[in-house]
Image (cartoon, rainbow, N blue to C red):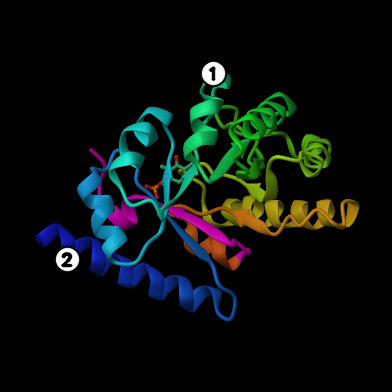
Amino acid sequence: MHQNMDIATRLIRIRGRIHELAAPRAVGLIAVSKRQPVAAIEQAYQAGLRHFGENRLQELIDKAPRLPADIEWHFVGRLQRNKVRPAVQLADWIHSVDSLDLLRRIDRIAGQEQRRPRVLLQVNVSGEESKGGVAPADCLELAQAAVECPNLICVGLMTMAPYQADESELRRIFGGLRRLRETLSESLPDSGLSELSMGMSNDYETAISEGATLVRIGTAVFGSRL
Ligand SMILES: *Cc1c(COP(=O)(O)O)cnc(C)c1O
């Protein structure tokens, strides 16, 4: 009961903040539920959330069947080649496509599974070596290939900022992703790359002010992870 209050109350505050920063635009909230129990996801669902994110496939496999079918699952973690089939079966959105090989594999398996996931191309704007993502210079080639894939819908770009980045670095990274999308849209006018998935608990406010259309928020919704 107490936890219930907490998640519902946190959600009211976060939604209010998103609305303040984004208006008149709308920004989608993805609750990143990794390492949170099913009961916590149920509470967020009861508070009206329908978009949840996981970064490990095994967790998605364990949780998705125990939760309402109208949840849209976002896979936000690094996707191994041998996990593409379950990812395509379970995830409605895949935020972490960063190579031609992975893209083509998702497209092929989605065709076999009669699924049509939305995908985002993950871009390594920060240049941090530990982060996944395609280099900005290679993004056009990947986007070109993505719009030609018949069994997926490429909806936009995703990035992550370093955890300790200061405000000016955050603006450089998030603004960089927005400018990259503008460049791609000029080269690929019919590509429909409208989404910018950027911003987590500690940096979503900056991400929204730099044009995020989707924020991926974990601990600020659910509290600390198990
Ligand atoms: C964990 C995670 C998030 C959410 O992180 P918080 O700091 O808990 O908000 C967002 N995006 C990705 C890719 C993640 O792995």
- Nearer-the-camera pick, 143 or 84: 84
Q: Is residue 224 magenta?
A: yes
Region of the chain picked out in magenta, as a range: 210-226
The quarter of the picture where the N terminus appears is: bottom left
Query: Does label 2 or label 1 sit earlier along the sequence?
Result: 2
Q: Secondary structure at mark 2?
A: helix
The image quarter containing residue 192 is: bottom right
Q: Is residue 131 magenta?
A: no
Q: Residue furthest left?
A: 1
Q: What amino acid does circle 2 point to?
A: Met
Give the residue at mark 1: 82
Instruction: Using a 10 Å C-alpha cutoff, classify the residue at mark 1 as few (fewer than 14 neighbours), some (14 to 19) or many (20 or more).
Output: few
- Nearer-the-camera pick, 220 or 73: 73
Q: Position of residue 153 (x, y in %)?
A: 69, 47
Residue 197 vertical position relative to residue 142 in the rendered view, above or below: below
Q: Position of residue 73 (x, y in %)?
A: 45, 47
Q: Position of residue 110 (x, y in %)?
A: 63, 34
The label shown at residue 5 is 2
